[in-house]
Amino acid sequence: MPLLSSTPSTFRTGPFGDGTHLYRPAPDVVLQQKYPFVLPPLGYETNALMPALNAATVEAHYRSVHASHVQALNTALTAHPTLHEYSLGQLLMGLRRWPEAARGPIREHGSAHANHALYWKVLAPGAATATAPNGRLGSMITRDFETVDACKAALREAALGVEGNGWAWLVKTATNRLAVRTLPNDDSPLLDGELPVLGIDVWEHAYRRMYQTQRAAYVDAVLARINWDVVGAQVE
Ligand code: MN
């Protein structure tokens, strides 16, 4: 049995073919990228996230870590031309469908590419206002966490609880609820069929240059710097 359908039509009802998947690619253009993948522009100067993140931290994280995952993903997928018609979102959500040799690199580098692109996007640069959730996201937070502060507290607790390398996530589940998750390494929520809404990278490379071992100070600074309008676009 071929691993790949000859047409991408199997994705019309979601990559698992069960029709329950709520993924819509519109909010996050990186998820629509196909091979060869490219590092998206940061959209601001590397010092624009001060005082939350300094230029050296952003520089190393974006230009070294993120960029190297994009390169490694392309290198790995060069040998799998049958996968070049699929978007990053499809590759992550359909992981079990792909040739076994491609799954590891897609899981590691594809996830990291998607995660970091979202991370850079939701941080408010320069004079941009760290807004408050409103619209559909605001309603969902009220429904699922009662208050914005409770949502932030759950994310904070999750971020502080990650052991080793990983991320804390606000996700939209397959039943359209908001939930907080922690995932190891760079695993994308899309691997579990959940839409990433907001991710906090708690690998040491995300904060050690500036905060040493003070992960809580980093998490608080990031949570104070979120552009919730951008986050809200993930669930529109
Ligand atoms: Mn990272």
Image (spheres, rainbow, N blue to C red):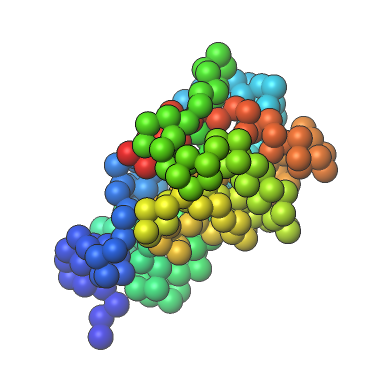
Report the front residue among 21 and 80.
21
Q: Return the x and y of residue 13 as percentages of the image width and height.
A: 22, 63
Q: Residue at x 76, y 40 (%)?
A: 216
Q: What residue occupies the far bottom of the structure in this picture?
A: 1
Q: Residue at x 51, y 27 (%)?
A: 132
Q: Return the x and y of residue 173 as percentages of the image width and height.
A: 42, 56
Q: Is residue 181 above or below residue 102?
A: above
Position of residue 15 in the picture relative to residue 197 (left or right): left
Position of residue 97 in the picture relative to residue 85 (left or right): right
Q: Return the x and y of residue 43 as percentages of the image width and height.
A: 47, 26
Report the front residue among 81 and 53.
53
Q: Is residue 47 above or below residue 189?
A: above
Report the front residue among 59 and 166.
166
Task: Find residue 9 and report its image quarter.
Answer: bottom left
Q: Does the image show residue 131? A: yes
Q: What residue occupies the far right of the structure in this picture?
A: 213
Report the front residue among 127 and 228.
228
Q: Residue at x 60, y 56 (%)?
A: 182
Task: Locate the N terminus and report the quarter of the image it occupies.
Answer: bottom left
Q: Residue at x 32, y 53 (%)?
A: 23
Position of residue 18 in the picture relative to residue 161 (left or right): left
Task: Find residue 199 and report its image quarter.
Answer: top right
Q: Return the x and y of residue 215 as percentages of the image width and height.
A: 76, 42
Q: Does the image show residue 45? A: no
